[in-house]
Amino acid sequence: MSAKNVEIITESGTERFIPLNKLKKSPNNARKTPHSEASIEAYAASIAAKGILQNLVVEPELDADGAATGFYFVTIGEGRWLAQLLRVKRKEIKKTEPIRCVIDTANDPHEISLDENVTRENMHPADQFEAFRKLAEERGYGAEEIAARFGVTPHVVRQRLRLGAVSPRLMQIYRDGDLALDQLMAFAITEDHARQEAAFERLSHNRDASSIRRMLTEASVAATDRRAVFVGAEKYTEVGGTILRDLFTEDRGGYFEDVALLDMLVMAKLGREADALMEAEGWKWAQVFLDYPHSHGLRRIYPQAVDLLAEDRATLDTVKAEFDSLTAQHESDEELPDEVDARFGELEAEIERLEAKRQA
């Protein structure tokens, strides 16, 4: 589309749909630091889902003689304009996509650009957290859907949803400035409002986030605990166990909340292991314990060094001799033949088996 077949509008206050390829970056824009790629991505996602919710403000481009060229400078809305250009690049829209704009020739373009960026007040984070939660609860949007509509990652959405689920009382304290964001994140490790508020009541002068997390997980078992590792998260959750997950820090697998259930699963698995051991090794009886029972009067027996039987010693000497011979034959080879490599494996296994007999 050429400039001559575009209707040129210069009257201030007029609202018009202008083709995207007739819009230009304004030299009078107060913002000199470029928009980040992430912000443009977010604008593009929002526009794709909901359209451009706020008009662009533009001024006509004039040539040296003061005549309109048919192009317009974007005074307000550069981020939204760049997002539409990104959507053209992605082939989501055409470069002639009509963009709703308001013509402004009455105000100084640099001043209104500055006004747009300075006088607006960002939404309080608490309002944003609760708004995301409302989308999830009232419209049934999942984290992936919300992420796609706002140009953020699903993980960020899950974090905001978790923060939006913090006790209303604590959220108000955060709004009032008596809780910092990292402290609010620490309370969000659990969704139980009563536990959150009880932990807040117990706080002393030490309100650092790590203390809050420790207080909320003191009755739980870390996923790195030997009991949790032995049973495994899959088995624990399969029978109804719950795991607290911290979405804001590396929690190394979370915290197992039902300690009694976990201990029961540990004892059951230990019992099965004991039965298998008795069957395999011929023991008459075996008992299992979570911790070593020092009070039962028994003591641990450790392996003792013993001499190899003459037959085993002879076999070991023969195997070692063959191993040394093969090593000498192939020490200069860059890569061992498959059959030689396999034989080395057999010899190493046999040496390990025979050496193990030195302990009984």
Image: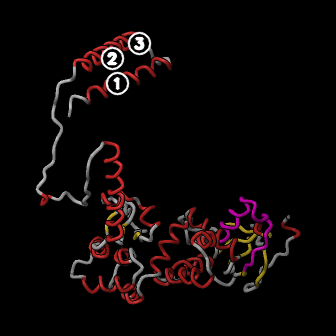
Q: Secondary structure at mark 1?
A: helix
CA gap, disc 2 and disc 3:
17 Å
Q: Which mark is residue 286?
A: none
Left or right of residue 135, residue 286 in this image: left
CA gap, disc 3 and disc 1:
20 Å
Q: Nearer the viewer, residue 40 or 57?
A: 40
CA gap, disc 2 and disc 1:
8 Å
Up/down of 154 relative to 338, above or below: below
Give the residue type that dot 2 points to. Answer: Val
Q: Which mark is residue 330?
A: 3
Q: Identify the magenta region.
A: 80-101
Judge the density around disc 2: few (<14), some (14-19), many (≥20) Cα neighbours within 10 Å. Answer: some
Q: Which mark is residue 319?
A: 2
Judge the density around disc 1: few (<14), some (14-19), many (≥20) Cα neighbours within 10 Å. Answer: some
Q: Quadrant of residue 305?
A: top left
Left or right of residue 270, residue 358 in this image: left
Q: Is residue 14 visible?
A: yes
Q: Residue at x 71, y 64 (%)?
A: 87
Left or right of residue 311, residue 182 in this image: right
Give the residue type that dot 1 points to. Answer: Glu
